[in-house]
Image: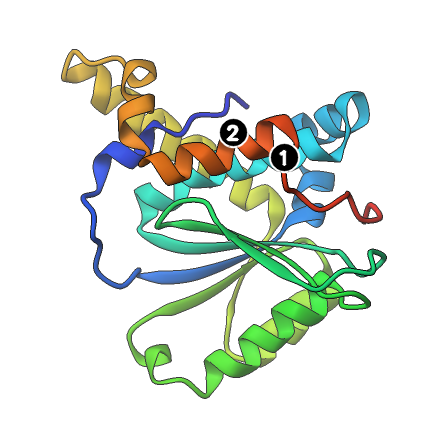
Amino acid sequence: MKISAFFMTLSPMPRSPAQALLLVDGYNVIGAWARLKEVRDRHGLEDARRELIEALIGYSSYQDYETQVVFDAQYQDTPGSRDVITPYVSVQYTDFRQTADSYIEMVCSRFRNEYRKFHQRLIVATSDRAQQQTVVGYGAEWMSALRLQSEVESAGKRVRVRQQSKGRSPGRLLASSLDPKAQEQLAKMRFGVDTPPPAAQK
């Protein structure tokens, strides 16, 4: 899977409310995608996290999703934190002793009682079967990790065809498509600056 973030050129900012809130169980997805498993095993979780996030930047922009990528930090004695990468993607590190599953369940529970449930979908991406049953019980839609991978790759192909038909190179548009703050956040992730240490693998 080739990672790309040039999808950001497709949508203007500021943006209207997203069509869906997508919650991604980060380590579960890394463990399910063959490419990310390989990166994790060869280069470590930090690189695998970064590649997943970069892939979801493009997909979320294309789909008009507000995406939260959730990573366990339950074994680190630090408070939870949230990094906003782009208007479409943020990264949530859970609190000490909190799992990604429990965080996702909390968000689903709160979403069920919010007004936006009437005009915004809630989707949870994970291949954890127990988690699937729980989030569906809260009224969320469930997406397997492999289905998410398929959709990310499919969206990438469609956008590449669209860009090529316009005679533009997606690679050349990357630098200008991300605002300076998003570029800074991705650079920090790339070089391991101000990011929490990896949690236990799922």
Please give the label number shown on residue 117: none
Front-lying residue, 148 or 201:
201
Q: Residues within 10 Å of mark 1 (few under 14, many from 20)?
A: few
The image position of residue 24, as x and y in percent, is: 57, 54
Q: Mark 2 points at which residue?
A: 187
Alpha carbons under labels 2 and 1: distance apart: 8 Å
Q: Quick check: 116 above or below 81?
A: below
> Which residue lies at the image location 81% right of the left edge and 26% below the top edge?
41
Give the amino acid type for the residue marked by disc 1 in the picture.
Answer: Val
Residue 94, x across and y down, in percent: 69, 62
**Nearest the camera: 143 or 107?**
107
- Are discs 2 and 1 less than 8 Å apart at CB? yes
In the rendered structure, the answer to whether residue 50 lies left or right of residue 98 reads left
x and y percentages locating residue 75 in the rendered image: 85, 57
Circle 1 residue: 193
Q: Give the residue drawn at x 43%, y 25%.
A: 4
18 is higher (above) or lower (below) than 50: below
**Quadrant location of residue 42?**
top right
